Image (tube, rainbow, N blue to C red):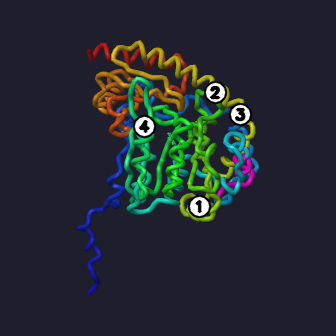
C-alpha cells in the first residue's frame, strides 16, 4: 500500500523557528494603524519627500531605451564599480574596484555581508538603539546578536567605548556599527573607531560598518568619520553603503559594499544565489549619480541641516519633549513624557492626530520612551506636524 500522502497534515505549516522568532517591524505596525485614514502626515519612514533628481531619472530612462535590460556581472558593471572606487577613494583613501561590489541596496548588502562571515551559533554584537533590520539579519542565519546600548544624557546619545570593548570578547565573530545612526543620529567619533578597530584587529573580529548615512553629516567634513579612513582594505572590515539616502533613490534598490578582495569571489557566488545582480539600467543610472551627483548631495545636506535645526527648535518648545540636535542622518529621536509605551502612543497619535511617527521601541528596548521623526521634508510640513503633536498632547493632558 502507498504511504498516506496526507500524513504530514498533522504537522503545522510554518516557517522555521528562527524566522518565526524574528521581530515584526513596529514602524510598519504603526503605519498599518494609519493605513486608509485620511490626511495622515507621515514622518515614520526613512526617506525624503522628494523624487530622485532628474539627471538620474533621465540616465535610467536612456539606459532603458538603449536596451540595458540584461543580467550583469554578479559584482556589478565595471563602470559602476570603477566610479564607486573613485568616489570612495576621494572620501576615504585609496580604494580599487576589486574591493567594491554592487548590491541591490543597503539592506541586501547587510544580508550578503552577514552571509559571508556569520554562521549558526556565532556571536555578534550590535550597537543600539538601531534600525531593526541590522539586528534581525544575523538571526536569520542562526547567529546570536548581543547589543551594547549608547547612553542617553545631557549630551544626547554617547558611546561608552570601554563598555563596547568589554562586550567584544575573543569569541565574537562580528561587530555591527551604524554611524551616522538610525534612529539616534549619533556619529561615532574617530578616536572610538580607532580603539574599536585596534581591539577587533587583536581578536580577529569582523567589523560591519553600516555607513549609508555618511553624506548626511553636519560636521565640517564632506562625510562622517568612516572605518574606511582607518582600516586597510584587506583586513576584516566590510563597509556597506547605499544610493537610497544620498541620491534619494530608495525605490531603486542600489547599494554597494567595500570589502577585502579575498572575499569577492565568494561574494559573487552569494549574489548569484540571492539576486544574481542589481538591475542593469539602475546600475547605469548609478554611474551618472556618482559621477555628477556631488552638487546635489551638497545641496541636500544644506536643506537637511536647515530642516533639522527647524524641527529641533520647534520641538524644544513643546512641553514634555526632551530633544538634542543630532550630528548626522535624517532623524530627530526625542524623549517624550507620555510615550513610555511608545508603540501605543504612536498608534494613538496617528489615529487621533493624523501624525505618523516611529515608536522608539522599534529600535530596541533602550529606545522605549522615545519617538523618531524623519525630517527630510519642507519646513512647512514640519510645522504642521509639530502643531498636531502639540494639539494631541494638550488634549491628552
Ligand atoms: C541604518 C540603515 N542601514 C541600511 C539601510 C538600507 O537602506 P536601503 O536598503 O534602502 O539601501 C537603512 C534604511 O533605512 C538604514 O536606516
Q: CA distance from mark 1 to mark 2?
A: 35 Å
Where is residue 71? Give x, y as percent.
Answer: 66, 59
Judge by depth and name the residue closer to the eye, 263 or 80: 263
Tell me the residue at 36%/25% (across/down): 335
- List the residue tagged with mark 3: 294
Question: Quadrant location of residue 170?
Answer: bottom left
Question: Quadrant location of residue 28?
Answer: top left
Left or right: 3 in relation to 304: left
Badge 2 local density, few (<14 within 10 Å), some, or many (20+)?
few
**Residue 314 makes an appearance in the image:** yes
Q: Do the residues under discs 4 and 3 have CB atoms within 8 angstroms?
A: no
Left or right: 396 in relation to 247: left
- List the residue tagged with mark 1: 267
Label 4 sits on a secondary structure element that is loop
Q: Where are the magenta residues, as a range? A: 75-85
Q: CA distance from mark 3 to mark 2?
A: 16 Å
Q: Is residue 283 magenta?
A: no
Whichever of labels 4 and 3 marks the residue nearer the N terminus, that label is: 4
Judge by depth and name the residue closer to the eye, 164 or 110: 164
Please give the label number shown on residue 160. 4
Where is residue 182? Give x, y as percent.
Answer: 47, 36
Q: Nearer the viewer, mark 1 or mark 2?
A: 2
Badge 4 local density, few (<14 within 10 Å), some, or many (20+)?
few
- List the residue tagged with mark 2: 220
Amino acid at each position: 500500500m502507498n504511504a498516506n500522502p496526507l500524513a504530514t497534515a498533522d504537522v503545522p505549516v510554518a516557517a522555521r523557528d528562527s524566522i518565526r522568532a524574528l521581530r515584526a517591524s513596529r514602524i510598519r505596525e504603526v503605519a498599518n494603524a494609519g493605513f486608509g485614514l485620511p490626511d495622515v502626515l507621515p514622518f515614520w519612514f526613512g526617506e525624503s519627500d522628494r523624487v530622485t533628481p532628474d539627471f538620474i531619472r533621465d540616465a535610467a530612462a536612456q539606459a532603458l531605451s538603449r536596451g540595458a535590460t540584461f543580467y550583469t556581472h554578479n559584482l556589478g558593471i565595471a563602470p559602476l564599480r570603477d566610479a564607486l572606487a573613485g568616489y570612495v577613494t576621494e572620501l576615504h583613501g585609496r580604494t580599487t574596484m576589486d574591493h567594491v561590489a554592487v548590491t541591490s541596496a543597503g539592506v541586501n548588502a547587510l544580508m550578503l555581508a552577514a552571509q559571508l562571515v556569520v554562521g549558526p551559533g556565532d556571536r555578534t554584537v550590535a550597537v543600539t538603539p538601531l534600525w531593526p533590520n541590522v539586528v534581525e539579519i544575523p538571526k536569520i542565519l542562526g547567529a546570536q546578536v548581543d547589543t551594547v546600548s549608547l547612553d542617553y544624557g545631557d549630551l544626547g546619545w554617547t558611546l561608552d567605548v570601554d563598555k563596547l570593548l568589554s562586550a567584544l570578547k575573543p569569541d565574537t565573530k562580528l561587530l555591527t556599527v551604524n554611524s551616522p545612526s538610525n534612529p539616534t543620529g549619533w556619529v561615532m567619533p574617530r578616536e572610538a573607531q580607532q580603539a574599536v578597530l585596534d581591539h577587533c584587529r587583536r581578536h580577529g573580529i569582523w567589523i560591519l560598518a553600516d555607513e549609508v548615512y555618511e553624506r548626511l553629516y553636519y560636521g565640517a567634513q564632506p562625510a562622517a568619520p568612516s572605518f574606511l579612513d582607518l582600516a586597510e582594505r584587506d583586513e576584516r572590515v566590510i563597509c556597506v553603503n547605499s544610493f537610497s539616502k544620498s541620491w534619494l533613490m530608495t525605490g531603486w534598490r542600489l547599494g554597494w559594499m567595500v570589502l577585502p578582495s579575498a572575499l569577492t569571489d565568494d561574494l559573487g557566488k552569494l549574489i548569484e544565489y540571492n539576486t544574481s545582480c542589481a538591475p542593469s539600467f539602475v546600475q547605469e543610472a548609478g554611474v551618472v549619480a556618482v559621477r555628477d551627483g556631488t552638487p546635489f548631495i551638497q545641496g541636500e545636506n544644506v536643506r537637511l541641516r536647515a530642516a533639522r535645526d527647524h524641527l529641533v527648535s520647534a520641538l524644544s518648545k513643546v512641553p514634555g519633549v526632551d530633544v538634542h540636535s543630532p550630528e548626522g542622518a535624517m532623524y530627530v529621536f526625542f524623549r517624550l513624557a507620555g510615550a513610555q509605551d511608545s508603540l501605543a502612543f504612536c498608534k494613538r497619535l496617528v489615529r487621533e492626530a493624523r501624525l505618523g511617527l516611529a515608536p522608539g521601541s522599534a529600535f530596541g528596548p533602550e529606545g522605549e520612551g522615545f519617538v523618531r521623526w524623519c525630517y527630510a521634508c519642507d519646513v512647512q510640513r514640519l510645522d504642521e506636524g509639530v502643531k498636531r503633536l502639540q494639539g494631541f498632547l494638550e488634549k491628552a493632558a
